[in-house]
Amino acid sequence: MKKLIVLKAVVAVLFLSLFLISCEDDYEPIPVKLEDVNGNYKGKLITSQGNIQSEKIINFTAKKDTVKFAEFPIREIVKTVIQDPVKTEAALVAIGKVKYNLDYTTKINTANNVIELTFAPKTLQFQIPVDGVNKNTVVTIAAKQKGYYVGQDFSLRFGLVAEKIVVDGLIIDPFTTIKYDFPYCIKN
């Protein structure tokens, strides 16, 4: 009987100490620095055009003032230009990887412990081979919102929009904008 009372007392003390420790509110977030943005990232890319949406994992690098994509997603752009699924796949294989550099400037938001990225996108230019002819393609990329590097979870979040496609000097019309959303990208 005495052992049971001692056991109950020990358990009660353990629960009380666990409860008091969990109430401790001394969390101080580590302040972000501009250099924290630099690094290799891996994250989800949600690409949408009209009602059609696709997701994939993408890798990119952020250095100093540029986000570098070794393989920018161009599938939707090529589909818009060619519109034939068989020829689209053949063109994507022939094109291979398309590199794209996205310039940005940074500003620290100390109130929210984030780094704000203001993007200055350039046009994306590449050749699309169709029926033995290379079509010069120029895509106007825009950033409608700022991007954010969140210090709490070390993630980068941003979005881009392909607003206009020009093929051999002719604007594709009608054209539904292509949205590239990067909702959560973490450092490798």
Image: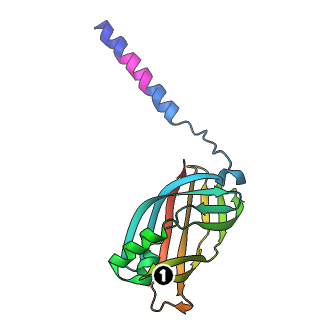
Residue 42 visible at all: yes
| Residue shown at the point (48%, 66%) measured from the top left | 96
Residue 130 location (% of width, % of height): 43, 81
- The answer to which of 141 and 88 lies nearer the viewer is 88
The answer to whether residue 10 is left or right of residue 23 is left
In the image: residue 18, left or right of residue 101:
left
Q: Which residues are magenta?
A: 8-15
Image x and y of residue 124, in percent? 58, 75
The N terminus: image quadrant: top left
Three-letter amino acid code at disc 1? Thr
Which residue was labeled with disc 1? 177
Along the horizontal axis of the image, is 111 left or right of 135? Answer: right
- Position above or below: 152 against 177: above
Q: Examine the structure image and report whether residue 118 is included in the region drawn in magenta.
A: no
Local crowd at mark 1 within 10 Å, few (<14), some, or many (≥20)?
A: some
Q: How is the image coloured?
A: rainbow
- Residue 40 percent across, percent down from the top left: 58, 52
Point out the residue furthest to the front here.
Answer: 132
- Relative vertical location of residue 12 with respect to residue 45 in this rendering, above or below: above
Instruction: Give the structural element (helix, strand or loop) at label 1.
Output: loop
Magenta region, main secondary structure: helix
Extreme left residue here?
1
The quarter holding residue 145 reads: bottom right
Picture residue at 37% right of the left edge, 11% below the top: 6
Report the front residue among 7 and 83. Answer: 83
Q: Residue 140 or 49: which is nearer the viewer?
A: 140
Query: At which x and y percent is residue 177?
Result: 48, 81
Q: Is residue 47 visible?
A: no
The residue sitting at 33% across, 76% down in the picture is: 86
**x 33%, y 13%: residue:** 5
Residue at the far top in the pictured view = 2
